[in-house]
Amino acid sequence: SKWVYNFGGGDSEGRSDMRNLLGGKGANLAEMASIGLPVPPGFTITTEVCAHFTETSEYPDDVAKQVEEGLKHIEQITGAKFGDASNPLLVSVRSGARVSMPGMMDTVLNLGLNDSTVEGLARQSNDERFAYDSYRRFIQMFGDVVLGVDHYHFEEILELAKEDRGVNLDTELTAEDWKGVIEQYKAKIADEIGTPFPQDPKDQLWAAIAAVFQSWTNQRAVTYRRLHQIPEAWGTAVNIQAMVFGNMGDDCATGVAFTRDPSTGENEFYGEYLVNAQGEDVVAGIRTPQNITVRSKEKQGSDMPAMEEVMPDVFRQLLEVRGLLEQHYRDMQDIEFTVQGGKLYMLQTRAGKRTAKAALKIAVDMVQDGVLTEEEAVQRVDPASLDQLLHPTLDPEAERKVIGRGLPASPGAASGAIVFTADNAEKLANDGQKVILCRIETSPEDIHGMHAAKGILTTRGGMTSHAAVVARGMGRPCVAGAGELRIDYKSGVLRAGAVELKEGDLITLDGATGEIIQGHVPTVEPELSGDFAHLMEWADRVRTLKVRTNAETPTDCRTAVSFGAEGIGLCRTEHMFFEADRIVAVREMILAESEEGRRKALEKLLPMQRQDFIDIFRIMKGLPVTIRLLDPPLHEFLPNGEAEIEEVSRSAGVPVEQTRARMLKLHEVNPMLGHRGCRLGITYPEIYEMQVRAIFEAAVEVHKRDGDTIVPEIMIPLVSVKKELEILRALVERVAQEVMEHHTQKIQYLVGTMIELPRAALRAADIAEEADFFSFGTNDLTQTTFGLSRDDAGNFLPSYQSQGILEQDPFISLDQEGVGELVSIATERGRKARPGIKLGICGEHGGDPSSIRFCHETGLEYVSCSPFRVPIARLAAAQAAL
Ligand code: PEP
Ligand code: MG
């Protein structure tokens, strides 16, 4: 078998579509080399070797030989020789999984240096200081990553050396100083691990390869994979590549760039670099990098010169690469490069992580430039990410007490309480608090806290620092590198000039401007025209699924319509019963002992319900509206506490004792499976009668007022037996008839049911005889299919997920195998019994992209979801259709 793939020297054995085998980094290095970009030669050990190694702690038979051949390939191209004292080949060893896992795994640079090759490097570079600095960096990295010697040991030695020499900066140490440090490093390692630092480059190489494979299962990587649902089985590849040095003098540099602005999507080259520095220095955020273009330098008001000014020739090479990459990949790329002796080398390219706003703009721009088709653009934007665009931003009119400014690293606005540690962020967020994680800088260890926080603030690092990259990926607003702010972890304060804030104090971040604001700032609704409207229009052109919304308040209905909802798929009338101005009447109705008592209370409710429906019908302007009759168990409406019991008793004119007795009677052991849904309608038909009357009277009224023709879709919940629906359908028809006769007006309407119990799904054929439509209530259907309580599952589901019993929370993403099979069965049987029966879904899954794909494939007509998910559903439905 082939375990090793070469690249470089104008050719490659791999391609960009081989990322599963070569990892993202390896696949794209191969691709870049084969399209003629300047890539230092190297080879990739496949992810299959990782899988084998993880399982057996051994390598497949042929790997050693193929690695040897890979080294020869590099030697041939570079002319250098691994381990050769006069012309040594040095390599980097880097991980690279199928999807990028920033900073999660380990890297070793300058591998191949030892006591003799370091002299060769010194002669070759004509720079002894550089050579010994490289050697000590190598020992430090290798010692830490491969040999497991804690990096503070090395830092301690280095600090003492500087103290000894009376200097502050590493750069002030001489070659002789480094030689001394190296001896101490080696002694420390021998001391810590009991064997000397390996001098044989081959030993170094194999140890580094093993360390990268092992890093796939380190704690950080495991946590990251869990958060991002990346299977362990994927493994990582290892990339071994000839070193190029960005730290060999002032005509050397290292940098990272995005071919377009990853934050706004503007078609502007955006990047950062450091002169005379080695790879990781930029990402690590230790030195503040400089801008690549003059334009972004000016935008940021930086006074440090841009690469465009300092290294015009390199800048031209980079611009050319930018053009070639975008043309080739037809997407925004995120690149890493090194400049050695004025020559540019590419070390990485990949599709750049971007904010939702940028994704949208880039996709739309590329269509307008003829690079992408509309369909391709529709597929380029992650539906779930639209969420970021639909949420409010800071009210531009509101007063802002700006206390500092940083880089606008990830847009959106967030207010919350200051926390200084990731653990605290997680803890407080679990308690339901909104928090802003404030760090000097973040590292992969902070991921959980960044996830829990509403926003992230750092005082150090650039637009490509860890905080910035991760926040953009997560869709969290982030202000990075706010250099004038001071965070003091010890005393737990954040200082901004004269302002001193403590943990728990409120701040607001504006990720679009980089402003840091004291206190809470109100927000405004997002702008839904422009790029957003274009993409949605293209999505609407290709999708076949309709998108409705679950809404019952006028505000929600309006929001949903503005987001493009094509009707209401679920109006939960019980939500209307909770309104403060009617809850007493509702309670009176429930607590009534007799039908007569109930009717009296229902009469008070009728005009309010009618007004609810009038409001909704007027907003929806003739779009379909599915109204579900009362569903939840009555006890949910019962009074809480003495005062409420007294109030209800007084209003109903019954003694308090009677109310109490009635409450006792209504108590249920298992209310979710109790007296709810259509069972209420069967036992207390007067409740449903009132609701139906309100609906039809509202339809008459709106027709009279606006001329809109309303076709109410009346939906009966929790049906499991055909007879239930038969009885309730007759009730609806009777009341409808009465209203229509009374007003001498004909109103078309549909009567249908939710399919939310397994029996209903299985008996869909006979139920369909009574139903004009089915709406899949996949919340209850999931609950009852799994026998898993919607309200209690949160306690143990996480453990089911971490043990791999369930891949995803079935209440979020439809269990397509089990619950999905019931949906399919009901669809098929329902259609057969009543061709043309209308089918939709209104469980939470109606807003989940993968569940939407399932609905499309099953042939439903519409999905219905909460208002903010409507655009997500439109886009997901389009992607499902492509
Ligand atoms: C459902 O069960 O899926 C549903 C939409 O109804 P509810 O969530 O109101 O029970
Ligand atoms: Mg339900």
Image (cartoon, helix red, strand yellow):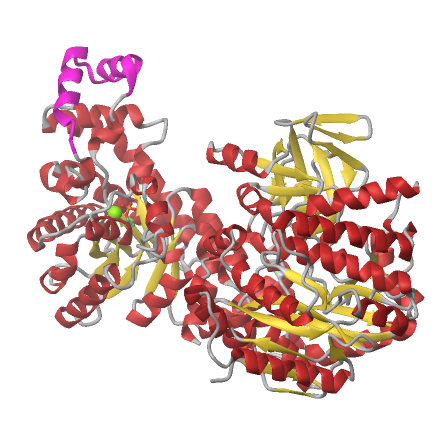
Query: Foreground: 11 or 848?
Result: 11
Q: For the stretch drawn in magenta, what is the main secondary structure?
A: helix
Above or below, 570 relative to 762: above
Q: Is residue 265 visible?
A: no
* Residue at 41% in and 74% down: 881
Quadrant position of residue 751: bottom left
Figure disc tally: 0
* Residue at 31% in and 44% down: 572
Query: Foreground: 699 or 795?
Result: 795
- 425 sits left or right of 763 in the view: right
Task: Report x, y in % for residue 308.
Answer: 89, 67
Quadrant position of residue 365: bottom right
Q: Is residue 630 visible?
A: yes
Quadrant position of residue 143: bottom right
- 427 sits left or right of 614 in the view: right
Q: Which quadrant does the C terminus fall into?
A: bottom left
Residue 662 lies in the magenta-colored region: yes
Query: Foreground: 200 or 155?
Result: 200
Query: Foreground: 828 or 13?
Result: 13
Q: Which residues are magenta?
A: 640-669
Residue 135 lies in the magenta-colored region: no
Task: Report x, y in % for residue 50.
Answer: 49, 69
Task: Report x, y in % for residue 541.
Answer: 48, 73
Task: Report x, y in % for residue 408.
Answer: 72, 50
